[in-house]
Amino acid sequence: MTELYIPKNEWRTNNAEEIKNFLTFRGISFARWKASHPLSQEDNESTILKAYEHELRPFMDKHGFQSADVINIHPKMDNLLALREKFLSEHTHSEDEVRFFVDGSGKFWFNLKNEIDDDDLVVCVTCTKGDFLSVPQGIKHWFDLAPEYFVKAIRIFTSKEGWVAQYTQSGVDKKYNQV
């Protein structure tokens, strides 16, 4: 189930409208998308992209994105732990990071400024099937595949080179990551 969690005050919500409003206020886009037709676990990348074309194409055209692909991370992958490590440290990007969860789940952690006292505000959004998230360039974040280690997601790019992570080395993520 999709959830927004703020560790500082132990606040949680599963209400999609509350999640959307909280993230939108901070410049992060959140939406729920539905496939144009049912999908199966065996569907290939082109079938998945076609099922969401009615959502993808308008978004990509409006925001200047050039390509989309499907990433399928699952527990039987050889490099699973190395892949998790790649995403698990706080970083930023030089372009927006846009993800749509076709299946599975994962936790996007954000290190934001608190509008009340200007301190860091760390929040976690557990994304699940149907969740669309667009993280603006420069927003500090990290992603955790645990505990399910299963994510099938559409990734949308201006250019794939834009996904290069610029690690902050802040260490903030260490306090929140599961071992």
Image: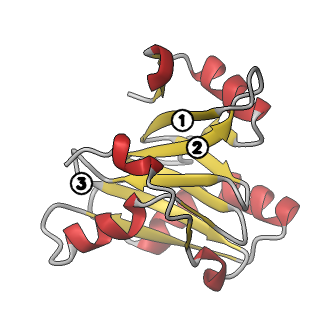
Would residue 17 appear left or right of 50 to someone viewing this image?
right
- In three-dimensional space, the C-alpha distance between marks 3 and 2, rounded to whole angstroms, equals 23 Å
Taking 63 as reference, is 165 above or below it? below
**Helix, strand or loop at disc 1?**
strand
Taking 79 as reference, is 54 above or below it? above
Residue position marked by numbered label 2 in the rendering: 111
- Judging from the image, the colouring scheme is secondary structure
Q: What's the residue at 43%, 15% (across, down)?
A: 10
Q: Quick check: can you spot residue 107? A: yes
For the residues labelled 3 and 1, say whether their Cβ atoms are less than 8 Å apart.
no
Residue position marked by numbered label 3 in the rendering: 149
Query: Hey, which quadrant is residue 95 in on the image?
Result: bottom right
Residue position marked by numbered label 1 in the rendering: 122
Kind of residue sitting beneath label 3: Tyr
Query: Hey, which quadrant is residue 31 in on the image?
Result: top right
The image shows residue 142 at horizontal and vertical percentages of: 48, 54
Kind of residue sitting beneath label 1: Val
Q: What's the residue at 58%, 78% (across, down)?
A: 164
The image shows residue 7 at horizontal and vertical percentages of: 44, 24
The image shows residue 65 at horizontal and vertical percentages of: 76, 71
For the residues labelled 1 and 2, say whether their Cβ atoms are less than 8 Å apart.
yes
**Helix, strand or loop at disc 3?**
loop
**Helix, strand or loop at disc 2?**
strand
Crowd around label 1: few <14 · some 14–19 · many ≥20 (10 Å): many
Taking 169 as reference, is 159 above or below it? below
Q: Nearer the viewer, mark 3 or mark 1?
A: 1
Q: What's the residue at 50%, 41% (across, down)?
A: 130
Q: Nearer the viewer, mark 3 or mark 2?
A: 2
Kind of residue sitting beneath label 2: Asn
Viewer-closest of 10 and 65:
10
Compare marks 3 and 2 and give the one earlier in the sequence.
Answer: 2
